[in-house]
Image (cartoon, rainbow, N blue to C red):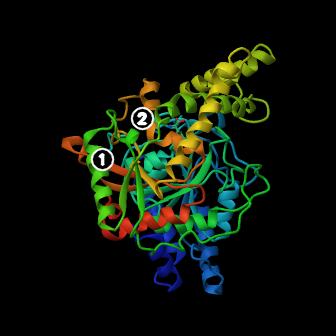
Amino acid sequence: MHTKTLAQLSAMLQSKQVSATELAQHFLDRIAASDLNAFLHVDTALTLQQAAAADARIAAGTATALTGIPIAHKDIFVTRNLRSTAGSHMLENYVSPFDATVVDKLAQAGMVTLGKLNCDEFAMGSSNENSYFGPVRNPWDKSAVPGGSSGGSAAAIAARLAPAVTGTDTGGSIRQPASFCGITGIKPTYGSVSRYGMIAFASSLDQGGPMAQTAEDCGLLLNAMVGFDDKDSTSLERQPEDFNRDLHQSLQGLRIGVPKEFFGAGLAPDVELAVRAALDQYVKLGATLVDISLPKTELSIPVYYVIAPAEASSNLSRFDGVRYGHRAASYTDLDDMYRQSRTEGFGAEVKRRILVGAYVLSHGYYDAYYLQAQKIRRLIAQDFATAFEQCDVIMGPVAPTVAWDIGAQSDDPLANYLADIFTLSTSLAGLPGMSIPCGFGQGDKNARRPVGLQLIGNYFAEAKLLNIAHQYQQVTDWHQRSPE
Ligand code: GLN
């Protein structure tokens, strides 16, 4: 049952081959038996209650395509009935008075919540090692990281602990863990998915999205997740669309832009091999490859690591030990209470970003760092606009290497930042991006570590991206492989 796609599970539920309750129990059993540290909070009674409600809805004939299908949420989305920690000691015991819009929309569609998923603290990281609740293990190789920050989400899909999950992507956190765990994930155009109830990291970049086994499944989820929300000031008002409407279109004549900056010296040979093989497969499907250039790619790292910490330092100022969050047990006065609470509540990476952010926003440095970064951000977006005059989609690696060993880079923040090189520019431009599994690394260790192919589309090209991914998944089986 756990190897089935959402589309298959949906058909089984509608034809009453399986009940929502049986399905939920099956995944709950798998979660209980797993040792990946992917799940932070599970409430069996709550899940079974939602499953019973889904069964009643199916019996009444009012089900949607998603009714009765289990889902788990990254612990960055707040939930009324389960704790919402953002992977932080600061919010260890926090229970939200409301559900995030995304959680609410998926529940309205009848999905059954399996629990909350581990992630890097406040979504800051690329390996899930920054979680206060410990690292998540990569199901393909338990000595490897699952990627981050949506590491619990990606691991849960790869280990078939859930058929669908939510993630968030600020600079790559859906695409990179999807790549490291051999699953499919899409970050939609900025503003498509409501940020209401998504614990804020960098508001001009944060974007929620689905992760699952296949592109078709991601489309089904996106259909229920996207939509205008007046509670999010950057939410886009657009006509509803069916993101799976183009799944069966031929790729004959598709122009794939291959940016030379994505294939430079930093790219591991085994990752390049898998990505080039995927490009060859697309040529067989009728596409042509076009050499393009995204000249500012390298600058995306300093630009992102100025803008994201700047926004984070502002967003995280709300955690002061007064309104909510951890409060130190002993302190001398008000200032000391803030200091102690924040010192105890935040982990090292979060503190590093608050310091960097406060620095680049401060008087005298604002013009030199923050303002410059904003200007280059605009130029990065223009690079993409120029590129999309020559091609319909851009493809390349998601990350320069396969997943690394747990602990290998945990005290080297710069190494982690550099590994974000291929995902940051898409986020800075607000464009949609996807990762689909396209093979494995090479050598004793890497042969069990997946490689992802990145697909970048123009604004609102999600349906096109899903079609392009789906066509590849019709002729390859990487997405069907699982570690078991
Ligand atoms: N790895 C990047 C960072 O650490 C991206 C994280 C994300 O997308 N949430 O900020």
- Residue 285: x percent and y percent? 33, 68
| Label 2 CB sits under 8 Å from any ligand 1 atom | yes
Q: Is residue 313 left or right of residue 249?
A: right
- Residue 301: x percent and y percent? 50, 31
Earlier sequence position, callout 2 versus callout 1: 2
Q: CA distance from mark 2 to mark 1?
A: 16 Å
Name the residue type under label 2: Ala
Q: Which residue is mark 1?
A: 449
Residue drawn at x 65%, y 65% is: 107
Name the residue type under label 1: Arg
Give the total of numbered labels.
Answer: 2
Pick the front one: 84 or 366: 366
Task: Give the answer, above or below, for where 314 lies relative to 45.
Answer: above
> In the rendered image, which quarter contains the N terminus?
bottom left
> In the rendered image, which quarter contains the C terminus?
bottom left
* Res. 170 in view: no
- Residue 474: x percent and y percent? 35, 71
- Residue 134: x percent and y percent? 47, 36
Q: Which residue is mark 2?
A: 419
* Res. 101 in view: yes
Task: Give the answer, above or below, for where 288 lies relative to 323.
Answer: below
Which element type, helix, strand or loop, lies under badge 2? Answer: loop
Residue drawn at x 36%, y 65% is: 472
Q: Quadrant of residue 144?
A: top left
